[in-house]
Amino acid sequence: MTAMTDDSSRSADSVVLRDALSDPLSLSDEAVAAATRLPPLAAVHQLPAAEVDALAELWTSTRADSAATHPVLARLGPAAHRLRELRRAERTTTTCPVCCFDRLDEPPYLAFEGVPEAEGDRESLAPPYAIHFGDPSRRRCPCCGFGFGIDDDPVHGDETWTFQAWLRFWIERGASWHDSSRKPTQWTLAAQFAAAGRAEPAVTPTG
Ligand SMILES: [Zn+2]
């Protein structure tokens, strides 16, 4: 008989945990054991993102009495909360300020923490954006092709682009991917904007 690998025993723990957390009021001994076997952050890291969110919510809302009544929640709740915050922060800093693609290889600017949510605040940001967000990556977004510190910096060309102007121009020309190998199947721009909590701009492609 072959010994269980670390991976398979970890994923077994993960299944037990998932079952337990779907009803945190009735935790089995097995679930408690699984929760204590792994460091909390490692344990929650294996859960699907939606469940990490749910666990973090539950922890936030029941923090006061959870230690006594939900041992697994008491152990994993803070880790789920932390992981959710870390993932949110990471998504924010690697989201393209033009097209909302959220898997840039690095933040577009050193101190970038997302574009302002209010339309008016966004409009008032003028390029070059390094003034507002710090050193640019000088790389292009694989989706919309905007070059951070390239297209918004007059040093690199005659034309200086704002995020908004590039977005309109790109959509008018059909919103095709700069690097099509990075394009997810079933991709839509509307869903990409929705995932970032922004409204898709009303621009009609010119064909
Ligand atoms: Zn982009």
Image (tube, rainbow, N blue to C red):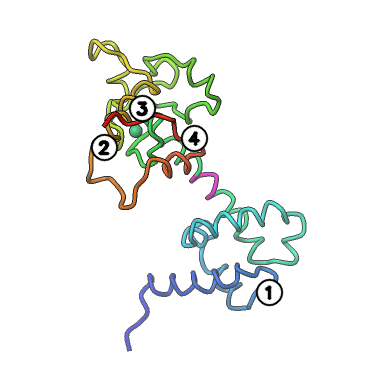
Q: Which amino acid type is marked by label 3?
A: Leu
Q: Quadrant of residue 151?
A: top left
Which stretch did the figure color magenta? 83-87
Q: Nearer the viewer, residue 5 or 82?
A: 82
Q: Are marks 4 and 1 in contact (CB under 8 Å)?
A: no
Residue bearing mark 2: 176
The one nearer the camera, 187 or 134, is: 187
Decide: is 137 above or below 94: above
- Secondary structure under tag 1 reads loop
Please report contact status of discs 1 and 3: CB closer than 8 Å, yes or no: no
Residue drawn at x 26%, y 32% is 207
Badge 2 marks a residue whose secondary structure is loop
Question: Was residue 86 drawn as part of the magenta stretch in this picture?
Answer: yes
- What secondary structure do most residues of the magenta stretch adopt? helix
Q: How busy is the neighbourhood of tag 2: few (under 14 within 10 Å), some, or many (20 plus)?
A: few
Say how many tags the image has: 4
- For marks 1 and 3 on the same chain, the one whose residue lies earlier in the sequence: 1
Q: Give me the residue at 30% from left, 33% from top.
A: 144
Location of mark 1 (residue): 26
